[in-house]
Amino acid sequence: MAFPHYLTRTASGRFVFRIRVPADLRAAVGRDFIKRPLGANLLTARLAALELSGRYAAVFDELRGGMEKKISVADVVASVAKNGAKRYEIDLPGGGRLRATDAADHARAMEALEAIGRMDYAPRAAVVEPVTPPVAEAITLTKASEAWLKSMEATTRPKTLTIKKTAITALVDYLGAGRQAHTITRPDMARFYQHLRDGGAATPTVFNKQSYLGGAGGFFAWAQASGHYPAGDNPAQGHIRYTTKEKRQRKKLGFKAFDLEQVRTLYAPENFARLSPGAKWAALIGLYTGARASEVGQLLTLDVAEVDGVPSMRFCEDGEHQSVKTEVSNRWVPVHPDLLSLGFLEYVDSLRCRGDWRVFPQASATAKNGAGNWISKAFGYYLGNLSGEWKPAKRGFHSLRKTVIQEMQGAGVPSELRVQITGHELDDEHHSTYSRDFTAAEKLNGVGPVPGLSVLAYGLDLDALRPLLTASVSRRRAKVPARKPSASAATRKRSATSGDK
């Protein structure tokens, strides 16, 4: 790269102003070269070099105007005696002598010499683009988002993948598809989050998007690990705080538990008959286990077995397309006596006999929102037709989970036992570190004087419900894409139709 005149760069990458002193002035100046450091910024160094070169040229001209050859003391005395004029003489560092004819010339020459010794350049303020740390590979935000989502496909549930895709798509739309991923800054992310708020997104929604983009395993963590974003600060973290007060407010808007009267209405034989055979069993499992819809929908027939002589069902992530919310959600839950009375084990045996390996063969294991999506929809539609006169509240299949927990709480089932049945985790290090797992019998019957899951008693008419549960559950049918008939097939069809007339 060609630099401006008088500008050089050292091995360390810093720039230096270097000018040669004219030969006729070296004796006066006392050096052959003059150097001044100008920093590491090329733009600032260029400006400084141009200005310094002009200023030093002016100083040299000033010196050259009053410079004379070196003379002896005797010559000076003779000159003064001859001319009768007052002269000013200056001894120079290089051994020469500067002669001025009056006080003004003398002062001007002194200033010029002093300037050479003290001249430093104060860099002017310049608009400099921020220097972005290097990355292994610079790619656009669109390509980075596609690669991030692709990296998670094999290990992420379709529903979760869709949510994360929504978050990164919103960022791409806001910053622009062609934006280089490594150029995104903290101010960019701050403006993006505010954009979401301005669009009506609540704090929990924005907070979740922040976790998807800036959390562990999020977009920027992946980009840093992949060499598409500089290591160090994660620009998507730390912007949104989800306060305890806001969490309390959100709880008020969450799902509400059913009271006993509502439970009896939902499971009254004349109403319950409206549900499909599979949805009936799903609704009963939810009522007697408190399991999540996704956990119920993914049950396999091998997940129903005896544990230490107690019929139980397992909610886990061991099978293909199975997953649970947290580690403690992997659990065995005893089959409630009411479910046994209604014929749940016989229902599972009938599935095994006909070769089905899923408890709900009509469910799609690869559905976008999980295997329990159909359960939530079926129960929600059923609930909507029965709850018209109830006090307005948020209700759905998840309300059964709250109902089970609150009924056990009211009956005196201890929290340690409740969380192992429902797959929650106590916020207590002592509990997680030192407590043991309850046995299936203890989960069902309780420990000592305290009750277990069998304490649930809703007062349902089991004898009237039992006949409603004998219908066979249908299998899920794969959809075959429609195919346009060939020309010959259409001709045969027309001929056959004409012959019938």
Image (cartoon, grey):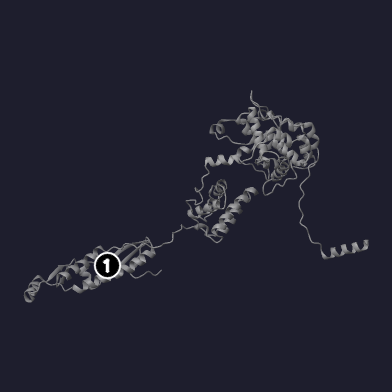
* 173 left or right, relative to 498: left
Badge 1: residue crowd in 10 Å (few <14, some 14–19, many ≥20): few
Which image quarter holds the N terminus? Answer: bottom left
Q: Which one is in front, 169 or 119? A: 169
Q: How many marks?
A: 1
Q: Is residue 27 visible?
A: yes
* 139 left or right, relative to 42: right
Q: Is residue 291 visible?
A: no
Give the residue at the far top of this rendering: 449
Secondary structure beneath dot 1 equals strand
Which image quarter holds the C terminus? Answer: bottom right
* 207 left or right, relative to 66: right
Q: Amino acid at mark 1?
A: Phe
Give the residue at the far left of this rendering: 81
Give the residue at the far bottom of this rendering: 82
* 314 left or right, relative to 187: right
Residue 86 in the image: state x and y as whole percent: 10, 72
Q: Is residue 473 above or below residue 224?
A: above
Corner quadrant of residue 271: top right
Residue 225 in the image: state x and y as whole percent: 53, 52
Q: Residue visible at 63% across and 32% down?
A: 418
Residue 83 in the image: state x and y as whole percent: 8, 76
Q: Residue visible at 46% across and 58% down?
A: 132
Q: Which one is in front, 385 or 204? A: 385
Q: Which one is in front, 14 or 363? A: 363
Corner quadrant of residue 480: bottom right
Residue 417 in the image: state x and y as whole percent: 62, 30
Mark 1, residue position: 33
